[in-house]
Amino acid sequence: TDQVAIVSGASRGIGRAIALLLALQGAKVVAVARSQAELNELTHKTQGLGIVADIADEEDARHVVAETLRQFGRLDILVCNAGVGSFNELEHFSAAEWDRMFDTNVKGTFLLCKAAVPHFKARKRGHIVGIASDVARRTFAHGTAYGASKFAQDAVLASLRKEVRPHGIKVSTIYPGLVDTYFNDTTPGSAEAEKTHLRPADVAQAVRYVLEAPAHVVVDELMLHPLTQEW
Ligand code: NJP
């Protein structure tokens, strides 16, 4: 396909795998993150566009969509993937760390959707794919801030789904379990994670599946876990 897709958080991890898979399938990919060097390396592979932006900043989020429209004339797919998390007992979280998770995971998703939806509505089509988490559907110790942010992001996407459906716009939410990425300052590729975690490419395949649904079908929700993970 020659679809135009924005992928947030594409400098590494899940977003990078999604960007590579979409590019492989012929999409024009706009890769978004704050790290210029990683984006340069990626766009070399995707032959797409890289935009350095902080999705928690309204001007940056607007710029991402405006620049995509300027360069490609349209937008077909928005993948809201960028996210951050850290885990601790409630009393050890700083207010700043709480804000960092909500600003990125919730407000960042809101701002990118807000920037893209008017264009989608005008064209009476468009597909928003949100990368949420299985922890948008369960709670766990040390997850007060991250879990709450993922519940909230999930609610943004689910409400938006109902709002934009009459305009022919799809919203699909993906709920992965553990994925072997750089998340929470980890380093992917360990022997242990190979046994217990999904690979970023597994999540990218889920994104591909929801995007390939026929025009009259919307995959609202898709959850996937490593077989070894109890949840
Ligand atoms: O994490 P990581 P994942 N503006 O750290 C970018 C969810 N998830 O791939 O800006 C723009 O390898 C950052 O780029 P940079 C998770 O909640 C994960 O695992 O250059 N971009 C990088 O490209 C998240 O929503 C697991 O630092 C921003 C990317 O985000 C999504 O999966 C399990 C940004 C993060 O890459 C991808 O996370 C689960 C900003 N303000 C859900 N802040 C898991 N890994 O186990 C960050 O259930 N980025």
Image (tube, rainbow, N blue to C red):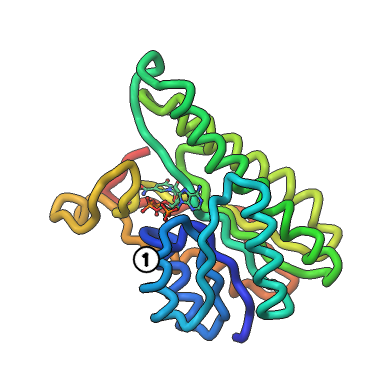
Q: Residues within 10 Å of mark 1 (few under 14, many from 20)?
A: few
Q: Position of residue 219 (x, y in %)?
A: 63, 61
Q: Position of residue 200 (x, y in %)?
A: 36, 61
Residue 156 visible: yes
Q: Position of residue 176 (x, y in %)?
A: 43, 51
Please report the residue visible at 65 percent of the width from the left and 71 percent of the height from the top: 68
- Check the picture and name the quadrant holding the N terminus: bottom right
Horizontal side, residue 62 vs residue 163: left or right:
left
* Whether the residue under disc 1 has CB within 8 Å of ligand 1: no
Residue toward you, 105 or 220: 105
Horizontal side, residue 113 vs residue 101: left or right:
right
- Check the picture and name the quadrant holding the C terminus: top left
Please report the residue visible at 49 percent of the width from the left and 36 percent of the height from the top: 101
Across the whole image, how many numbered discs are drawn on residues?
1
**Disc 1, SS:** helix
Q: Is 139 rendered above or below residue 39?
A: above
Please report the residue visible at 46 percent of the width from the left and 67 percent of the height from the top: 18
Taking the view exactly as shown, the residue that stands out farthest to the top is 91
Residue 174 visible: no
Taking the view exactly as shown, the residue that stands out farthest to the left is 191
Residue toward you, 185 or 25: 185
Residue 215 sits in quarter: bottom right
Horizontal side, residue 153 vs residue 73: left or right:
left
Q: Amino acid at mark 1?
A: Ala
The residue carrying mark 1 is: 37
Residue toward you, 23 or 164: 23
Horizontal side, residue 152 vs residue 190: left or right:
right
Q: Position of residue 37 (x, y in %)?
A: 37, 66
Residue 53 sits in quarter: bottom right
Residue 16 sits in quarter: bottom left
Please report the residue visible at 69 percent of the width from the left and 57 percent of the height from the top: 62
